[in-house]
Amino acid sequence: MATNLASVLPDITGWYRISCKYDPAFQSDLKDAVGRGNWSYQPSVRQWYVREAYAKIAVAVLKGHGYQVETTLLSTITQDNPWIAIFKLLPEEQARSMYRKAILVVHGDVSGLDDSYMKDLQNAWEEVNREEIENG
C-alpha cells in the first residue's frame, strides 16, 4: 500500500500551508479540529492554510488519516536561538547569504555588541550545518 505524503510548512506570517492530495474526509476533520476562523482554503492555488497555533493539530489530523507528514513547526525548533529557525526555513544559499550579512551586523569588532550575539549566530549556523551533514 502506498503512503500518502503531506506537508505542513510555514507560509505567510502566522499561517502554515498544508499540501496533500484531495481528501474530503481530511478537510472535514481539519475544519472540525481547528474551528472556524483558524483555517483558510485558497482555491486559486488549491492550498489549505491553518493558523500557526493550529499547525500541530493539522499534523495530527493528517497522521490520523494515514499521511506521512513533512513539517517544520517553528515551535519544535529551538526557541533559545531564533537564528536556528531562520536558517532552517531558508533555502541553503539564502541561509548562507543571510549568515554572512548577519556577521557584519552582530560581530563585536564591527558593531560593538557583546560576544553573546555572535556566539548565538555561530552556534545556530554550526547546528544547522551539522544536521544537514548528518541527514545527507
Image: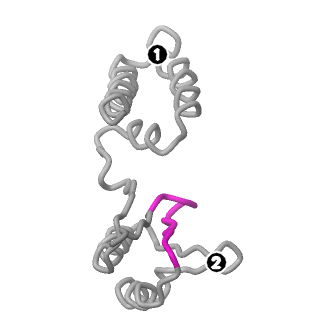
The percent coordinates of residue 91 (x first, y second) are 54, 39
Numbered badge on residue 42? 2
Q: Which residues are magenta?
A: 8-21
Mark 1 or mark 2, earlier in chain: 2
Residue designated by label 1: 107
Q: Position of residue 56 (x, y in %)?
A: 32, 68
Q: If the image is split into quadrants, where does the C terminus sit?
A: top left
Callout 2, which amino acid? Gln
Q: Which mark is residue 48?
A: none
Where disc 1 sits, the SS reads loop
Q: Residue at x 32, y 27 (%)?
A: 130
Give residue 62's quadrant in the image.
Answer: bottom left
**Position of residue 75 in the picture relative to residue 46 (left or right):** left
- Disc 2 packing (10 Å; few <14; some 14–19; many ≥20): few
Q: Residues within 10 Å of mark 1 (few under 14, many from 20)?
A: some
- Identified by mark 1, the residue type is His
User: In the structure shown, which secondary structural element does the residue marked by tag 2 occupy?
Assistant: strand
